[in-house]
Amino acid sequence: MSGLPVLSLVVFSPLIGVLALLLVPRDNHRAARWIALLASLASFGFSLALLGYNTGGAEFQYREDLSWIPAFGMRYTLGVDGLSVVLVLLTTVLSVVSIFYSWDPIRVRVKEYYAAMLLLMVGMLGVFVSLDLFLFYVFWEISLIPMYLIIGIWGGPRRVYATVKFVIYTLVGSLLMLVAILAVAIAHASAGHPFTFSYETLRGFGYADGLQALAFVAFFLAFAIKVPMWPFHTWLPDAHVEAPTAGSIILAGVLLKLGGYGFLRYSLPLLPDAAVSFAPIVIALAVIAVLYGAMVSMVQPDLKKLIAFSSVSHMGFVMLGAFVFNVQGLQGAIFQMISHGITTGALFLLVGVIYERTHDRAIAHMGGLNARMPQYAAIFGLFTFASIGLPGLSGFIGEFLVLLGAFQYSGWVAAATMLVVIMSAVYMLWMFQRVFFTVPSDWMRRWWPSLKDMNRNEWLALAPLIVLVVALGVFPGPVLDAISGPVDRIIEAIDASQGLTSFRLPW
Amino acid sequence: MELIDLAPLLPELILVLLVLAIITVDLFLSRTAKWILTPFTVAGLVLVGAACIPVWGVNERIFEGFYVVDDLSVFFKAATVVIGVLAALFAPSYLAQRRLPLGEFNAILVFGLIGMFVLASSADLITLFIGLELMVMPAYLLTAFHKTDRYSNEGGLKYFLLGSFASAILLFGISWTYGLTGSTRIEGMSALALAAGPAGIVAIGLLTVGATFKAAAVPFHFWTPDAYQGAPTPITGFLSVGPKLGAFALLVRLFAEGLGGMSADWFTVMAILAVVTMTGGNIVALTQTNVKRMLAYSSIAHTGYILAGLAAFAHAVDPDIRAQGIESILFYVLGYGVMNMAAFAVVGMLQRDPRRFGGLGGFAGLAGRAPWLAAGMAILLLSLTGIPPTVGFFAKLYVLIATVDAGVAWLAVAIALNAALAAFYYLRVIVYMYMRDPEAEPAPIDRSPLGTAALAISVVGVLVLGLFPEPVLAFLQASVSSLF
């Protein structure tokens, strides 16, 4: 492995795909699709090398470190720990899946679409492997614009509204985060150290309480909007409903994880005192998000909206697990991110399958699909159960661990959250029933003759997700092993902290 | 009497000769050969740029201390040359479509550059004023350059009247300063002004109003929209950038060099001006449906960001951090210069049909009709918004670093929020280009090779400087160090 810049290859092979796409004639859709698929497969292939990550070895492996802008100590530093490894793999898998799935549905401006998808990949992967706060920010912003275009160009009828809302929301958060990043780096530099944005250097520094509190709030806004956490979630349903299927897969599968990753990688280790002091309010918001997301999901008339709101609920679990500060909670949070990425990605893909056939997603228009599309019903059922958290599928592990962690924090929090396990069964199963079992609606009967079961491409796109959702549910061990190191380090940082001592927060 | 050594004035001298040469050559060129003037002007400007190299590191005061050739001035001059070259490249085809004389344009443009050179090098309030007038007189002329167009005339007249008014205020401030302190020298002004007591504050107040008027800060910005809208589009690009560069050269000279010693006294004013300017500019830009006007208003917002750099300078105590404030101004002015001129050039390219006025509709569906042009414009707009990896992002970052480092984090927060606000109207153009269908009768696109090439170079520059700003940073930091 020595010598080969694996991480750079993972991050930038999609970029090579973008450059290759520029040379393709506009109407050669076939070439554009193949280039995009090959570029994403290359990135995926390189990311497989990360399976060689040594859980007992150094904290950050596959490191690359180059000088970039020395005037401000900005460096091109890449490296991965277990947390990054699992998220990078999730990203490459889901990117390949969504690029492959887009083969048929995307028919206009194909070349630009794939360029945007690949660029999005660069941004997301870069976020997960950066060890320099400035570099991290650059990748963070790079991931924004392609999604803006994907929703805005290939989305549904209200796409412009949705995409502008998405961008403005995210930008407000991220620009404040930029100020916080600068404040943190400058605080470190003004203590007599050389100016640096290196994560590893900035992490251990004891920042003043006031700075920690303000910086925490700024980071929190950026990440909470991305997660999205109640009450910052309002952009998500709009974005999901309008986004094309592959956009939804990436949005739910990976982009939301950027927020969760941000909390675990930056907020907690960088600003442990503030994190400890702010934990109660974050936990409160997380519990609200879990319950609110589930309750709102129950009344959604649109399949995509339902899954979007269930994401709010599931990501609430992530936030809850992250802020109860114990091993189970944190492991559960990370596992939940992976599992949610796979499950929700698959569910959006499945919604896409029916949308391609009927151009509609209203639950009221469905019904009786089981009769016409038995394979589709079976797979949809599998992921419905995974989303509910049925033991044996990946969703169970994450939720169970988070609840275990929450119990150690407070029985009440755990009890309140536990309600959602029932509620999620209600909204998912009820949805499943209305779509697949009841009498077909008159509307659906019109499509009846032309309704075909899943085709080969759809199967191929879903296959890796089916394997993963079962495999992770039965053998969560490898993932839990990989993330145990990073989790221990977060706990260490938190345990060493007394919280903000120089002033009290109102809770 | 000893002879003055004119060697440090080499760039200025070449500029003056260039003006005369352009006028002379223009006389002897037939109508079909006028195009030669563009390469001629560009070559002359490149020569001027080359002449800046031996002047680097000279750090000399000449004309009895009225004129200073230091590294700071060299940076401003180099930036001026870049802007001048871009203006000379973007304008010709737009002017030709409207039968406007190229020779006069080039001559007036270069004349304006002389004013900017003098401003950058002024060591005395008198020189400062002369430089300013040398710069703005051509700017008035350029605004009214489209003689038969009433908007152009109106804009020029408004610009001239309000500009003269501002010049008068500035001049009044200079006379107060002289009356109180007995000196018009910039260096050491603050000590004398402080000694003068309250009357000194009046003098400084007048100078501030005059100077911020020229930089188009809110509430002294009212001349900008009409002047910018009326002027021929590529000229608007130059006007939004060139005189701004000059105005900031003036502000840096006056406030950093002259009044730096009492910066604690004017910090609050500058900080408030910065916030009001960026917010005001953005809010008005939000409501524009005409891209040309939108860019004009947004240039006010950018003035606000740059002023924040000056406020950072004022608030900091440590000389390194003070230098950072000035550096951020210089970087921003340069980066903004390139990206904004290029953005205006794109608007101009969509005005091949002279009845087109740069409305948003003209941009509808541009991505389908001219994918490369749309992509270039998208990059420029993202840069203006401040999204990495572009020069606009790094410029904002520089100001943010300066403000946070100086301990005025609230100013940084104001910039961050404003940048998000600005995203709304900049991205709206991208929405039109990429997410709407073209109009029934789409605006014809001007694809002159010269303008296109200059645009391509600007876009690449915007990206490269955003990713690898280091060479410029080194130049910048070295030039600012001559001030401290």
Image (spheres, coloured by chain):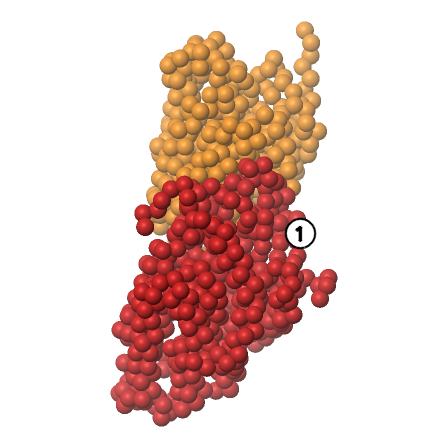
Chain colours: A red, B orange
Quarter-wise, where is residue B411 in the image? Answer: top left
> Label 1 marks which chain's residue?
A
Q: Quadrant of residue A434?
A: bottom left
Nearer to the camera, A225 or B452? A225
Which residue lies at the image location 51% right of the left edge and 25% below the top edge? B256
Position in image of residue A164 (x %, y %): 38, 58
Asked whether the viewer can see residue B309, the reply is no
Q: Which residue is mark 1?
A: A66
Residue at point 36%, 55% (across, down): A280
Decide if residue A53 is on the left or right side of residue A154.
right
Q: Image point 46% across, 62% down: which residue?
A: A326
Where residue A205 sits in the image (x, y, percent)?
Answer: 54, 45
- Which quarter shows the N terminus of chain B? top right
Q: Which residue is nearer to you in this view: B237 or A31?
A: A31
| Crowd band around label 1 with a 10 angstrom C-alpha radius: few (<14), some (14–19), many (20+) | few
* Secondary element at image label 1: strand
Instruction: Tell me the amino acid under the disc marked 1.
Output: Leu
Q: Is residue A114 above or below residue B119?
A: below
Figure disc tally: 1
User: In the picture shown, does residue A406 fall above or below B6?
Assistant: below
Q: Position of residue B132 (x, y in %)?
A: 49, 25
Q: Is residue B333 above or below residue B351?
A: above
The structure residue drawn at horizontal position 48% and vertical position 64%, both measured from the top left corner, is A327
